[in-house]
Amino acid sequence: MLTPSRQFTFLVRIVALLIFFFTAITVTTGFSVKSSVPVVTCSSTANNNNHDIKNERRVFVGGLRQVGEEDDKEADVETKLQLDLERRYGPISNVFVLRKTSAKPYAFVDFVHAASAQQAIQAYSSSPGATDVNINNNNNATDANNKDEGGQENFPLYREIKAAKTIVPHKRIKSLQRKTLTQSDFNTKHEIATSSTTLLHVQKSHVHRVMSFLEFHNIKVTGHYVCGGVAIVGVQEEEEDEVRSFLRGLEDTIPIFHRAIQKMYHVNPAQMVVEELEEEETAYQKVIQLLQKLTKSTTTTPRVRFNTFPPSKAQELILYLEHNFPQLSHLLAPTSCTHILNVVKIPTTLRNSNLWCIGMNQVTTADPSQNMKTKDLICRAQSKLQEAFARYNYALPDAATTSQNRLVAVDCGAAPGGWTQFLATKVQCKKIYSIDPGELDPIVFNTHYGDERVVQHLRQKVEYAMDEILQLEVVEEGNNRKSPMVDIWVSDMCLYQMSQQVDLMLQAREVGIVGEGTFFVLTLKCTIGHSRKTFDEQVATQCDRLLSLGSGGVVRDLQTIHLFSNRGGERTILGYLT
């Protein structure tokens, strides 16, 4: 057993060995820190990507005479190269000679005119055997072979000329991309600030659902941005309080919608302030001007409440008001207010620039977005079925198509009974088969149709409950049983595979429990992937399956909805069987 001191010494030696090996590998492989200066290379070795900048006046000259050969000095090589190329092709502005120990020196030459550079490239490419030219001036035989008809040397100092490109370093590319994204971010948020009359404070997980829902109801959405775990959605109202009236109309049909929208901010685009150098004085002065204007325009004393985003700005505004304008502090009232002053700070990634949206609205009625609580429900899932029926505009089957006006439903995975309660009380089904091995809330058994209890709890799995449903319907209806037996099939089961949800409904169709005209609502719960696109693709696969079965599919009027009540990986499909 090693003592603590020896253990420490052993660890130090291991660390020293690791450092030694890492240093040796680095030296051997030639790892080096990349320079931030643009790298110049010939076109034959350059990476052909979108960030290469083509310089039509620059050429690459390879195979230069080695320094030290005979009496050639470094300056002599550069001078001779410049004189030779100028004599052949035209004036030159710069010559850059680069030398490496393991390869022939090479140079980059900048001609004054692009045509001269192109002439040099074409002349070299049209000279056969140019790469075999011996550049040693002591070899008289070779020099004689390298002279043209006029007695001039043919490429005496170099072996190749090629087009050159300048490659932008990776760091500079990232910097340019950041600048582009920064400006795009500012433009998007500036558009929201200058065109929105109402800003909605929305849960980040619901932002796309809220936007699509508003656009479906012809409410213009100007854009959105995410700030932490929440998002701000801009809306342009054509009429005053259009959004407020719209939300108030959803209180009974889709109450869960108000949970997605946490707050509303009524703003005036004309009051928008661009903050620079992070000085909030300009925005605060705009707030003071609105308060002063309000006191002059009313005969009674107004009571004002700040509605800000981020919420911490409310306390900062109050402190600023009390310190600099104490004569206006009596207007503030957290409750029983007559006016709401909305202040929203929109941070941007553009340096030293933020946007402030400011507006004031008079309190007339209770703001529906401030009262997010829904009525008491047995479980959260109950709001899914309520929203699904409301958004699909489900029409009850004709009484002539139901036996003795009995509307029969099957609720798969019923516990604790939220969907069953909705079917019994809102849809007014006369018989509901609630299938689930778990317990149901006792309140769901309180609904009766005459002397008969509406809900019948089948405490078993769905595939086994189908035989019992067939037997019960035969006993109750006899030879006059309906076909199909069930008018509504709903399921919110959590299954290992999403496809099992569809399989069970198709199995019920085969045995005659459901059939043509049966309305169905299925919650498809995605268990693979994490992105919204992946979830949508998985659900689309199941929908295509229903639409392709048989000659023309087994469903009609099929819809896929990402309900506000759904979790991020859930989608609801609903329609009619054929």
Image (cartoon, helix red, strand yellow):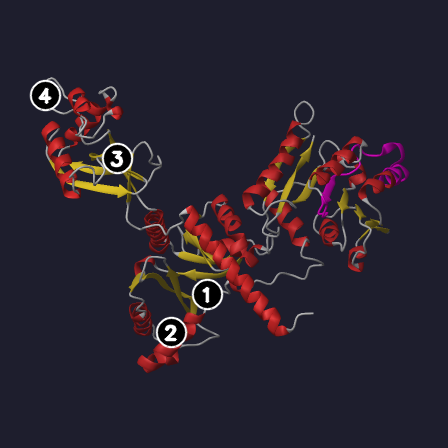
- Residue 303 appears in the figure: no
Give the amino acid type for the residue marked by disc 3 in the picture: Ala
- Element assignment for label 1: loop
Does residue 62 appear to the left or right of 329 in the view shown? Answer: left
Give the amino acid type for the residue marked by disc 1 in the picture: Thr
Residue 61 or 503: which is nearer the viewer?
61
Quadrant position of residue 480: top right
Write the start and end of the magenta stretch as one range: 469-496
**Numbered label attached to residue 364:** 1
Give the amino acid type for the residue marked by disc 2 in the picture: Leu
Give percent across and percent down for residue 439: 81, 56
Which residue is the site of mark 3?
164
First reached walking from the N terminus: tag 1 or tag 2: 2
Q: CA distance from mark 3 to mark 1?
A: 72 Å
Q: CA distance from mark 3 to mark 4?
A: 30 Å
Choose mark 3 or mark 2, whichever is in front.
Answer: 3
First reached walking from the N terminus: tag 4 or tag 1: 4
Determine crowd level at label 4: few under 14, some 14-19, many 20+ residues with C-alpha closer than 10 A. Answer: few
- Element assignment for label 2: helix
Q: CA distance from mark 4 to mark 2?
A: 88 Å
**Numbered label attached to residue 317:** 2
Does residue 458 appear to the left or right of 301 in the view shown? Answer: right
The residue at 36%/58% (across/down) is 348
Which residue is the site of mark 4?
151
Choose mark 4 or mark 2, whichever is in front.
Answer: 4
Choose mark 3 or mark 1, whichever is in front.
Answer: 3
- Element assignment for label 4: loop
Confirm or deny contact between disc 4 and disc 1 (CB under 8 A). no
**Image quarter (top left, top right, bottom left or bottom right) of the N terminus:** bottom right
Choose mark 4 or mark 1, whichever is in front.
Answer: 4
